Image (cartoon, rainbow, N blue to C red):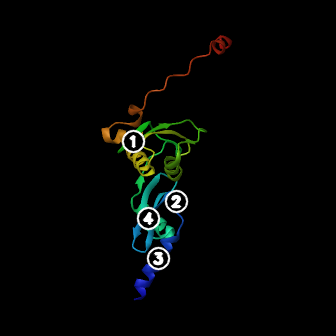
Amino acid sequence: MAERDNRRDNRRDRDETPEFADRLVAINRVSKTVKGGKRFGFAALVVVGDQKGRVGFGKGKAKEVPEAIRKATEQAKRQMIRVQLKEGRTLHHDVNGRHGAGRVVMRTAPQGTGIIAGGPMRAVFEMLGVHDVVAKSIGSSNPYNMIRATLEGLRQEASPRSVAQRRGKKVADILPAREAAPVDATAVAEEA
């Protein structure tokens, strides 16, 4: 019996640790007309991430808003994906995502650009831990479809290390060779 209580306490401690940040994206109120009037229900859409490369989304429905948010957060924690980030701040390469009529285009960006993305996509990038990205939503503006399209695109993201490992090559063979810096003519003349 005491062992079971210890397990419960450990589980409770694990749930209370704030390792994940969450962002409420949308709340939808729906009503059902019944004999005595209307019954209201709420649907919540939540994005959860550790801001270090893991992100997930969930949706929950309940009669009260806090319960719907709790259900959505639980589901989001169960459905997390890991995304490899370049220098811990941006994407490795440009990528497109699609879900239903929702299409998104995500592009890597230089340092200092910030997150240039709208609504639900911004929430995904902030919870993921991306600092510099340019993104555009094309088609559906439905937040559910936008988030699914964004996550579908992020699943396609591949780091040079993973590509090299899959192809059995070295990372240096995969990345384009950088050109040597142009020689300054005045510096050469001074040395001579």
Quick check: 149 above or below 79? Answer: above
Marks 1 and 2, Cα distance to the nearest angstrom?
A: 22 Å
At label 2, the amino acid type is Asp
Tell us which disc is closer to us: 3 or 2.
2
19 to the left or right of 7? right
Which residue corresponds to mark 2?
Answer: 22
Marks 3 and 2, Cα distance to the nearest angstrom?
A: 22 Å
Q: Which of marks 1 and 2 is nearer the N terminus?
A: 2
Local SS, label 1: strand
Asked whether the beta carbons under mark 3 and mark 4 sit within 8 Å of each other, the answer is no
Q: Position of residue 141 (x, y in %)?
A: 45, 45
Which residue corresponds to mark 1?
Answer: 97
Q: Where is residue 39 in the image (x, y as percent from the top left)?
A: 44, 70
Marks 1 and 3, Cα distance to the nearest angstrom?
A: 39 Å
Tell us which disc is closer to us: 4 or 1.
4
Marks 4 and 2, Cα distance to the nearest angstrom?
A: 27 Å
Quick check: 74 above or below 129? Answer: below
Q: Which of marks 3 and 2 is nearer the N terminus?
A: 3
Residue nearest the observer in this picture, 143 or 5: 143
Q: Earlier in the sequence, mark 3 or mark 4?
A: 3
Label annotation for residue 10: 3
Asked whether the beta carbons under mark 4 and mark 2 sit within 8 Å of each other, the answer is no
Extreme residue in the right direction: 190
Tell us which disc is closer to us: 4 or 2.
4
Question: Which image quarter is the C terminus in?
Answer: top right
Question: Which image quarter is the N terminus in?
Answer: bottom left
